[in-house]
Amino acid sequence: MAWQRRNVPVLLLAAALLAAATMLVVLSWQLTFFQDTWAILMGRQGNSAHDFLTPHNEHLVVFQVALEKVLIEVFGMTSAHPEMFVMIFTLLGSATLLFVYVSRRVGPWLGLMAAVLLLFLGSAWQVQLWPFEIEFSAPIMAGLGMLLMLERNDRRGDLWAFVLIVVAIGFGSLGISFALAALADVFVRRGERGWERVWIVVVPLFLYGVWYLGWGHEAQHHLTLHNILRSPPYVFDGFASSLGSLAGLNTPSITGPTPQPDWGRPLLVALLGLLGYAKWRRPGLAPTFWPIAVAALSYWLLAGFNFIPGREASSPRYVYAGAALVLLLVAELLRGVRVGPRALWAGAALTALAVLPNLAQMKEGADWLRDQTVLTRADTGAIEIASRTVEPSFGLTPEIAGTASLIDVSAERYLQAVRDHGSPAYSPEELASAPEAGRHQADVVLSLALPLSTKTELQTYDPGGAGAGCVEIDSGALPVGGVPLRPGVTRIEVAPGPQAAFKLRRFAANEFPVGTEGAPGESTTLLRIPRDNATQPWFLQVEAQQAARICG
């Protein structure tokens, strides 16, 4: 029984890890590649140093690129499941290492609560559900492992710490903060071990410097004097946002503006007051506090130095790392404090109350990403259908695609990737039964990718020109569903009268999303539809006050 009591937190952690993994798999199962992932898939199709070492924005992402390439080579591009499983592994690994770290300071029950809060942090839904954001979860996992290795205080631990620092930096700039944390550890322990361990920091930072001189300096940076002077409130808001998110108080609608940490600010002030009082009663800080403090401060300072709109301290993708660092700081500040049963029950209740709104935020984020998946699969499916005639430079800009997440996708690169690794898009048959938003956008993309074209001649209407294959439209009458059209040239004749409008649809069921210039009265328009890779017909609707005729 004593053994069982001691291991209950570990068993509950295992249950929480299983529940979190199941939740993430279910929420992400229908999702496909999103936004920055396309920048890697489209822009780094070779295996040169340029493909691996070119910065993404201003970040080194060499391990992300290598990982994506391996997954695509092994599993193909038909599904995003492999990259999602890797992402889930880093999330579960981070929570497990956090449990170990916190348990060593304040006991396994508080370690369990910390791990649960991080596992179900829906305020950081972008990191939880978007595999590209492994640039945050992988450095957190590697950084936690590094801190635990440094605790060994021996050569083997130093070697592993060095490896993990390299891993953290290779996944993103967050790794720099953990390198600085290791430097703080070397400084704190210099009295007992000297400076000989500094190589575990100097070598990774030297390698980073070589990369920066060779490739990183070419990236656009946002370091300005204004950002430096504004960094103190940014750092405060960073800690406040992380704390408010952990408490379940920072979960606004994901489609609204980036939230302000209105709840987190007073919560942070209150927490600082309580911790200050506790340290007044019990002075002193453990040496291991300083590496965590350096990591947390440098993380928010570096983010503040490079601030641009969209990189607010309360942004969901920044909250994950901030929350993990806050939990580490609290564990260090409470180190050695004995927590009684009543306090543990209160902590468990507060943890549950914090998780519930975070779960709602996670679900909302998954729903939004699912909508983006529909547009992505529909838009790329349209490019595949139009592959015979689409211009190689044709791109899925927001105006064409209906989403800003496909700006890195061009027809030439996408079709080459499909030939090499398979397609993640809807097939024509799947597109015909896809959600209406995707069918609508596929018609828009198709009309421009094929492209559809019209040529109008004036004063050419022949009242007696009807023949075989022509459909007569009475004055003001709109055929239900439109007139079906096949590839080739269709002649649209409009009787004398005001301007007529021509609208088309193909996969859309309830609307005609493709408009044309239309034509004036007493005119003939030739509508050209190139042949493509789908068998579904187009449908034409003529909106006119006078009679019209459609001839295939």
Image: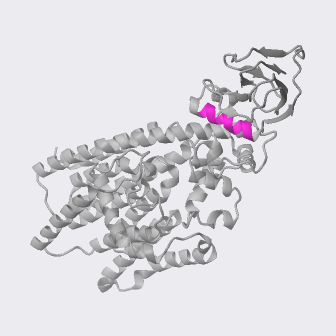
Residue drawn at (72%, 36%), measured in percent from left and top? Answer: 446
- In the drawing, does residue 116 fall left or right of residue 36? left
Q: Please say whether residue 439 is one of the residues in the magenta stretch.
A: yes
- Front-most of residues 448 and 545: 545
Q: Quadrant of the C terminus?
A: top right
Say whether residue 498 is left or right of residue 437. Answer: right
- The region drawn magenta spans 438-448
Left or right of residue 125: residue 379 = right
Q: Does residue 288 show up?
A: no
Q: Is residue 470 visible?
A: yes
In terms of image quadrants, where is residue 11?
top left
**Which residue is situated farthest in the front direction here?**
497
Question: 250 above or below 517?
Answer: below
Quadrant housing residue 506: top right
Q: Nearer the viewer, residue 329 or 353?
A: 353
**Height in image: 50 above or below 247?**
below
- Check the image and report above or below for 149 versus 488: below
Q: Nearer the viewer, residue 337 or 439?
A: 439
As for residue 544 lying within the magenta part, the answer is: no
Instruction: Give x and y (percent) for residue 151.
Output: 32, 70
- Residue 82 picture quarter: top right
Q: Position of residue 371 (x, y in %)?
A: 52, 38
Which quadrant of the figure contains the N terminus?
Answer: top left
Residue drawn where x is 42% and y is 47% of the image: 256
Where residue 123 sits in the image (x, y, percent)?
A: 37, 49
